Every structure is written in C-alpha cells, then in structure tokens.
Image: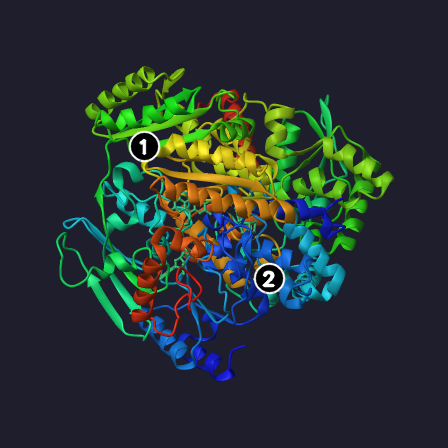
C-alpha cells in the first residue's frame, strides 16, 4: 500500500518511533522555531493522535503538516530507522482526502497564480518581465526581484523567465553522428521556463559524449509539487501524461537534472500508480532506467575525460536533499567537479543541510524559508569560493537569492554547466592549437 | 481550561507569538521521551525570552494557582516534563545564549536552553571540555540536564553533571529571582542550594542561568574491546582495572542479549555467543594513554577475556563505539515499546545485578537486554515489549518492580541518571523509608508550598 492511498500504510513507521527526539538535532525547521510541532517527533505524535481519534483532521492540523521541507535529515539521524518522509506524505494526502484541496489552499492558490504569471510571461515576453519583475543587472545570471507581492514577499530574487522555453529551442530529437545511445531528457518546469542554461548544458554534454538526446514535447510538470502537498489526483494525472510522452518516443535511458524529477521518475510514479496495472508496469520500466545526470555520467556512460579544458573556478558544492538523501547521490557530482582541470573544490561546513527552498514550502512559509537559507548563505560565505555548484534548479534559485541578498559575489550553477564549460574550453584550446597558437 | 484573563496576562508579558494555545500545538507538549507513559495536554505553552519574563509567568501562575511544567528538549526518560495536571508548559528553548566562556576561571555561563553540544562546540575551540555527555548531547538542554543531573559515558573518570555546576540563577515559586554559587571553586556560604537544585527536576524552582566548570580537553584517547564467555570474569575484570589504579574515561558493558541484537543490526564482528563484552577507553596525555592501554589489555587478558582488541586508529575506534552506540537503537527496533531503566549498583555488584536481571526476565517471560556504564555501576536493563499487549505490560511492571528491589538490596539506587519524575515516584520509600520521603516533602513544601512547580513529580502531595 502506498503512502498516497491510505494513512494505514504508515502505522509501522509510527510504531518504530520511540520519541527519543534525536530528530531535533538536525531538523532545519525546528532549529529556527524551537517548537515541537516543527520537528518530526511532533508531527508523528499528531498523526498518532489523529489515528487514535483524539484529534480531528482540521485545517489547523493540515497547517502543521505543512511545516516540513521534506529534507529527510530526520530519517538519516533517526536511531530507529523511521522513514519520516513517508509519514509526512501520507499525512498530507490524508488531509486533502478529508478536507479537500482547500486544506492546502494557500499553496494551490499561490502556485496557480505563479503558473498563470509564468504562462502570461511566456506570451508577453519582455513586457511582462518589466511589469512584474525588477531586473537586477548581473554578470552571469539573469535575475530579478518581484515588483509586487504575490504571496511570497518581494525579497526573493528570481531568475528571469527565459525568452524561449527550453523545449521550444530544441527539436524533439537531437541527433549526433554514430550515437552510442539514445537518452530521453526530462527537463522539469524550472529548467524549461527559467534555467534553460542548465538544460542546454545537459544536451551539450550528452552530445559531446556521442549520445542522441530526445526531449519529448508532450512532457509536463513532474507532479512533485502536487504529490508532496497531498494532491494525489493531480500528481497521478501528471505521472500518466509524462509516461505516455516518453513511451511514445522511447529511449535507452532517461536523465534528469533536477532532484524532484529524479525522485518522481525513480520512486513516486510507481507509488502513485500502484493500483493501475498498465501504468504501474510502465512506471516501473522507466524507473529502472532513470538517472540523475551526474549519476548517469559516472555510472552508466562514464564521461569523456579527454577534451576537458581548463575552468578557473573555486567551487563549493551544495547537496540537494532529494539528490543526496533521497537518491544517495553525493559522491558523483563531486567526482565530476574534481576531474575538471582548474576547478578547486572547497567544501562548506554542512553541504547536506537543507537550503530551505523545498518548492512550495518557501511559498507557504516565506520567512522560515529565508531564515533557513541564511545559514546556508553564511556557510557559503565562509568558503571564499567564487562558485556554488548544485544539482537542482530549485536549490539554485534559493542559493542565488541568498547570496544576492547578502551581497556576496558568487555564481550559482548546476554541476553540469561547469562540465559543459570545460568541454567548451577544451575545444577552444584545441582550435587555437590547430591554428598554431599556443594558449598560455 | 484557563481563564481568559490568564491567557491575556501571559500574552501581555510574552507577546502572542510566544504563547501557544491551539490544540494542534498543545498536544505536541503532552509527552516526552518516556515509553509507555500516559500523555496529558497542557492548557498553554509559553516560551519566555528573559529571566524577567520567567519570573512574571511564575507570578501569574501563583496568582491564579496554575501548575507550571518547565521543559527543555523533552528527552528525559522519567515522565519529568509531562503536564499531568494541565496548566502551563514553560519551554526554556528560547533562552539559548552562551553568555560567557571564561578561560581564566575555566567556567562558562549559559542560559538553560543551550544544547549541551553547542556549549562543547564553543569550548573545544579553546581546548576545553564540558564533560557530562548523556546519549542526548546533541539534543538535550543544559537546563534539562542540570535538572536531571544527567550522567553519560564518562561518569567513571569525570563524574556527572552535578560535579560541574558552580552557580545558578533561579526563579523561585514566588517569582523572586536569586543567585547562588558562582565562579569560585570554594564557596560555603549558606546551604548548598546549587547542589539541591541540581537534579531537582524542576520541582523546586526554575533555572534561568547556569555557571559550569570546564576542564582542559584530554590530549588523546584509546579504545579497547574485550570479549568474555562468563559474566563473573567480566565483573572481575572491571574490578581489577580499578584495583590497578587505572581510571578509564569509559568502561561499558553489553550482555549477551544486547550483543546478539547489536550484531544483527550493525555487523560489527561481535561474537554472538559471548556472555559479555567490555568496552574501555582511556584518555589523557599521549604517553599516559599509551601506557594505560597496554596495562588494560594485560589485565583483561589476565582476567580471562577470550579476545582483546585495541583500536589502532580513529577508524577502528569509531567501529568499536558504533556497536555500543547502536545498542539502544538496535534494541528499540526489535519490539515497538522500549522500557529503559537505569537502576544502579556499586560497581563490584555488577555481575550479581546482571544475573538478577536475567532471572527476572526468565520469571516473567520477557526479553530484557542489559547494557550500560559498568565502570560506575549504572546499568540500563532494557525491556523490549509492546505497549498494546496488556498481559505482557502487566509482567513488565512486575519485572520493573523486581529490578528496583534487586538494585536496592545490592546497596544500589533506583535511578543513576534518568531521574524519578512520575515513573519512579512510587518506589521512593523503598530506598528512603517513610521518614526519608517525609523529609523530601518538607523540602518541597518549604520552597513550593502550593505545589505549583512541576507537580506530580518526585514528591507526591498528601
Ligand atoms: C536516547 C536517549 C538517551 C539518553 N541517554 C542518557 C544518558 O546517557 N545519560 C543520562 O543521564 N540521561 C540520558 N537520557 C535522558 C535525557 O536525555 C537527559 O535527562 C537530558 O539531559 C534531559 O534534557 P532535556 O533538555 O531534554 O530536559 P527535559 O526532558 O525537557 O526536562 C527534564 C527535567 O528538567 C526539568 N527542566 C527542564 N528545564 C528546566 C529549567 N530550566 N529549570 C528547571 N527545570 C527544568 C523538566 O521539568 C524535567 O523535569 C537519554 C534520553 C534518551 C531519549
Ligand atoms: S529520531 Fe526517530 S525515533 Fe526518535 S523521535 Fe525522531 S522520528 Fe522518533
Ligand atoms: S524532513 Fe526535514 S524539515 Fe521535515 S521534519 Fe524531517 S528534518 Fe524536519
């Protein structure tokens, strides 16, 4: 039984909890609020009271369940092996079943507004940007601040909407000579609308490694923002849509460059569709060949080391929660960074500490999100690097907002962008050499 | 339910954001880490930001005769923070500043909401150490651990919390603020209230500031593991190490039931048929540590250990301690409910106590695994059970009674470090007799005549 279908699916997890409170040592929310309801132990108790009939599913309760970035730090620190990530997802799904979507109305409402804003933006292009966002001149990232508050405050620094979406910039199939393999790229929303530079780097690196890339047009949102907030119905529909789109084009493997996308394809789709034999089989099939881009380049098709050019950067790497604890990927991006000539990796104090973004969490709890982010920014500042690399566009947004507001000169990029940069540098050096000029 | 004006007064003093009244919040303060204990919802939770605010809250509570339950991180194992009569839960977590580290006097002054590890993170930078290290160093507060007089793994050589508390600022039951003790090593002015309030479990007053003693951090350490096929031999080995005038920082024991569970859990290479393993750590100056480690090894061999291992590097050391640190979690995963006791005996009686526990387990058909701080006689017989099984829980309660009887008859005590709280209140006269319990009550009533501070804990009202 999956956590999306019934609260009973987690009774064993609840029984495992011995209320020792060890989760308090790592919970980013509890560290800020110091209120028991912030930590896993508190929310576990609430679910227990709910199951025992001592507490009703109220909107107040749904609000409490929204107090979690789903960073999974408590899972890792729990001596009893409690999977709190399952508990919170089940609790939120139950809230929506019992109270309807309005129990998460703030999330749904704001997310909807945002989505409309983005779509409008794509249509009206720069006019919209001028109205809604105040552009901040910057050397590498196209970023802006909200001019008016849509419920997330005006402090957050946003990336500018791309002029064209990633998916409209490429043909559905990007061919190479003598392809080794055909790989499907699930872009996810943030890369499609905002961070097309990450998407382009993914295509570039894969092509560089003689891999044909397909970007199915029919793909959409991964549905994680919905499933994480208990909107199982929408999440299920999105899962099916994506499976259909990818099945139509077919591929030897699927890559993602965002941690939500990876989580969705590897775990969530099959859980959502457990009662749908046809789609469950499809979901299982694609789950088995889904990879995060860094994982793919280390384990599936080891990336070419020849042709890597020099990239002069001091880099610190932030572990996205759902890549690190969620998918066990933390060594791979570092291995990629360390193999790039010129890159010096300097670790920050707690690279695995949640950045506080957590998708819609930062919309529902903007102040808390910023407080959590401030710790991250402070840790980054201490590294005296010029670049923060990470494996997730959502983290990139949060980290950029953090360093920008703190006035720190620091570029925030996806690991894959530095790898693409290195291949580019390699090519440039090569042409120069062929032309008889030796670069110094 | 509290009268509206009480809430209004609390909000006036603390601000609305520091006063929780919604039931979804209140219910998360109805329990602590104690297993198989009935929960109780408080009427309100307040989080003061200053001593003055604490004092105001206590005065309001006094005016309306509302019980106050002080709370740190709620990790105690004796029901100490459960608000059994409703009323006010006083969360001390917002008083979380390290006020001063004084390198000349080797003291630190902290607020009660500071987490023990946070203090240590600060002082290790200066080559200093605050030694008390309960299993919850990364979560428990200074105020909570002072109030429980927490122990930990280093008790044998370094003592427990009470050996490090030099001064306190206190809010009394009438709301008055007093200071006792200070930075001086010597202080005999008046009764030793610092000692009285250390371990008082919040029943006599609220701690709002703490001056602790720091020591220079030991230069290095070394760990040794010894396997025994016989409990008496393990017991003799413990006595023999001490008789040879070596005081290890830690001297831990795990019995067969613990070894089996832990081995299943972490695969640390412990022999499944061993009757006991001892884990010893010596620390201090490098030269001394080298010498003592070899001596300990020789003693353990002489006492008939079937296998002795010295950790050669940090990695090996970590592996040895992983087994010990996994003891409670591993046991906790075996059955849904984990009843952890901390009956303590003079260290020479450890083998007798272990055997008594085994007999009790057999008699009541229970799974009891025992591990603990052998060096200071503090054992953790851990009953693995299921709260939902009524018949088994009855046997658990009988077994707990008998474990306490055994400890007391061996010249030991009910609780070495977890406190009395609600859980062990009814056994007090076994240890003190009626007159002793009456003396406790007189002290309580002298300082808190109306039973407003953590009522229902330690001292029962007649
Ligand atoms: C897994 C686990 C392992 C443990 N290991 C050990 C161990 O090795 N050794 C050990 O000794 N204990 C151990 N404990 C018990 C517990 O961690 C300690 O007693 C701890 O120090 C309590 O701190 P706390 O902040 O959680 O206090 P709380 O549980 O919040 O409170 C404890 C008591 O202090 C009172 N109190 C709290 N703050 C104040 C204040 N400012 N003024 C007055 N009264 C106050 C409360 O009313 C209560 O009676 C363990 C517990 C767990 C769950
Ligand atoms: S650490 Fe695990 S067992 Fe302990 S309170 Fe948190 S969730 Fe429960
Ligand atoms: S998942 Fe993260 S934010 Fe949520 S309770 Fe656990 S540690 Fe806290």
Q: Which one is nearer the viewer's eye here, B459 or A317?
A: B459
Q: Residue at x 39, y 81 (%)?
A: B63
Residue pointed to by mark 1: B348
Q: Residue at x 37, y 47 (%)?
A: B417
Q: Which one is nearer the viewer's eye here, A331 or B161?
A: B161
Query: Is A135 placed left or right of A247 in the picture?
Result: left
Q: Which one is nearer the viewer's eye here, B316 or B180?
A: B180
Q: Residue at x 64, y 24 (%)?
A: A301
Which residue is the extreme one toward the bottom? B5
Structural crowding at the residue carrying mark 1, measured as other residues with C-alpha within 10 Å and reported as few (<14), some (14–19) or many (≥20): some
Depicted B192 relative to depicted A220: above or below: below
Which of the 4 image quadrants contains residue A111?
bottom right
Q: CA distance from mark 2 to mark 1?
A: 51 Å
Co-location on one chain, circles 2 and 1? no
Residue B433: image location, x then y, percent: 35, 55
Residue pointed to by mark 2: A64
Total residue callouts: 2
Mark seen at residue A254:
none
Residue A212: image location, x then y, percent: 72, 29
């Amino acid at each position: 039984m999956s956590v999306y279908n019934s609260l009973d699916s987690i009774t064993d997890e609840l029984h495992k909890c011995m209320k020792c409170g060890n989760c308090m040592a790592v919970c980013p929310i509890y560290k800020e609020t110091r209120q028991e309801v912030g930590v896993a132990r508190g929310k576990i108790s609430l679910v227990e009271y709910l199951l025992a009939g001592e507490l009703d599913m109220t909107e107040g309760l749904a609000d409490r369940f929204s107090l979690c970035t789903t960073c999974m730090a408590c899972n890792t620190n729990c001596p009893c092996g409690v999977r709190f990530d399952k508990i919170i997802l089940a609790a939120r799904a139950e809230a929506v079943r019992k109270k309807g979507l309005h129990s998460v109305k703030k999330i749904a409402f704001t997310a909807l507004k945002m989505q409309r804003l983005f779509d409008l933006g794509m249509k009206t292009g720069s006019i919209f940007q001028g109205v809604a966002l105040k552009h901040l001149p910057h050397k590498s990232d196209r970023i802006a601040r909200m001019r008016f508050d849509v419920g997330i405050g005006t402090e957050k620094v946003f990336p500018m909407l791309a002029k064209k979406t990633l998916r409209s910039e490429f043909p559905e199939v990007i061919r190479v000579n003598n392809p080794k393999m055909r790989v499907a790229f699930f872009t996810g929303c943030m890369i499609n609308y905002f961070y097309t530079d990450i998407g382009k780097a993914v295509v570039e690196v894969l092509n560089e490694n003689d891999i044909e890339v397909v970007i199915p047009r029919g793909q959409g949102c991964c549905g994680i923002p919905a499933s994480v907030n208990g909107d199982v119905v929408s999440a299920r529909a999105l899962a099916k849509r994506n499976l259909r789109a990818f099945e139509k084009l077919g591929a030897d493997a699927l890559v993602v460059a965002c941690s939500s996308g990876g989580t969705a394809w590897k775990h969530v789709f099959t859980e959502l569709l457990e009662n749908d034999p046809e789609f469950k089989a499809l979901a299982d099939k694609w789950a088995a060949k889904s990879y995060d881009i860094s994982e793919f380049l280390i384990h599936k098709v080891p990336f070419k080391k020849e042709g890597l050019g020099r990239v002069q950067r001091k880099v610190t790497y932030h572990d996205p929660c759902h890549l690190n604890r969620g998918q066990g990927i933390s060594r791979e991006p570092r291995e990629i960074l360390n193999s790039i000539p010129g890159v010096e990796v300097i670790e920050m104090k707690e690279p695995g500490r949640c950045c506080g973004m957590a998708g819609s969490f930062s919309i529902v709890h903007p102040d808390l999100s910023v407080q959590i982010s401030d710790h991250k920014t402070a840790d980054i500042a201490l590294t005296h690097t010029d670049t923060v690399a990470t494996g997730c566009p959502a983290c990139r947004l949060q980290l950029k907002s953090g360093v920008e507001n703190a006035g720190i000169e620091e570029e925030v990029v996806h690991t894959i962008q530095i790898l693409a940069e290195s291949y580019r540098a390699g090519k440039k050096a090569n042409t120069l050499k062929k032309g008889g000029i030796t670069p110094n | 339910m509290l009268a509206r004006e009480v809430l209004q007064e609390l909000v006036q003093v603390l601000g609305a954001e520091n006063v929780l009244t919604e039931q979804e919040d209140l219910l998360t303060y109805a329990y602590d880490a104690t297993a198989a204990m009935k929960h109780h919802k408080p009427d309100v939770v307040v989080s003061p930001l200053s001593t003055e605010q604490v004092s105001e809250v206590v005065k309001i509570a006094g005016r309306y005769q509302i019980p106050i339950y002080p709370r740190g991180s709620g990790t105690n194992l004796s029901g100490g923070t459960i608000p059994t009569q409703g009323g006010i839960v006083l969360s001390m977590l917002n008083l979380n500043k390290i006020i001063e580290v004084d390198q000349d006097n080797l003291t630190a002054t902290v607020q009660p909401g500071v987490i023990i590890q946070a203090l240590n993170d600060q002082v290790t930078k200066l080559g200093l150490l605050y030694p008390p290290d309960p299993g919850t160093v990364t979560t428990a507060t200074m105020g909570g651990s002072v109030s429980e007089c927490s122990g930990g793994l280093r008790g044998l050589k370094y003592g427990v919390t009470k050996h490090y508390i030099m001064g306190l600022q206190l809010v009394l039951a009438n709301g008055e603020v007093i200071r006792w003790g200070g930075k001086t090593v010597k202080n005999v002015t008046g009764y030793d209230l610092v000692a009285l309030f250390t371990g008082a479990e919040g029943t006599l007053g609220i701690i709002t500031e703490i001056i602790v003693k720091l020591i220079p951090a030991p230069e290095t350490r070394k760990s040794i593991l010894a396997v025994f096929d016989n409990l008496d031999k393990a017991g003799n080995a413990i006595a023999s190490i001490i008789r040879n005038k070596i005081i290890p920082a830690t001297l831990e024991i795990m019995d067969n039931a613990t070894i089996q569970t832990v081995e299943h859990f972490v695969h640390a290479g412990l022999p499944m048929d061993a009757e006991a393993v001892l884990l010893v750590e010596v620390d201090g100056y490098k030269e001394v540590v080298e010498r003592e480690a070899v001596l300990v090894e020789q003693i353990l061999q002489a006492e008939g250990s079937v296998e002795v291992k010295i950790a050669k590097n940090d990695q090996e050391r970590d592996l040895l301690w992983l087994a010990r640190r996994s003891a409670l979690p591993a046991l906790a995963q075996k059955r849904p409910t984990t009843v952890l006791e901390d009956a303590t005996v003079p260290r020479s009686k450890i083998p007798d106590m272990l055997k008594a526990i085994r007999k009790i387990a057999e008699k009541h058909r229970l799974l009891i695994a025992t591990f603990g701080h052998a060096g200071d006689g503090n054992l953790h017989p851990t009953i693995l059970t299921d709260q939902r099984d009524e018949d088994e829980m009855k046997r658990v309660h009988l077994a707990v009674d008998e474990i306490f009887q055994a400890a007391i008859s061996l010249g030991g005590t009910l609780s070495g470090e977890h406190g009395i709280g609600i859980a062990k209140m009814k056994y007090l006269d076994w240890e003190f007799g009626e007159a002793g319990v009456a003396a406790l009550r007189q002290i309580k009533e002298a300082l808190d005549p109306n039973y407003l501070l953590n009522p229902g804990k330690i001292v029962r009202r007649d």
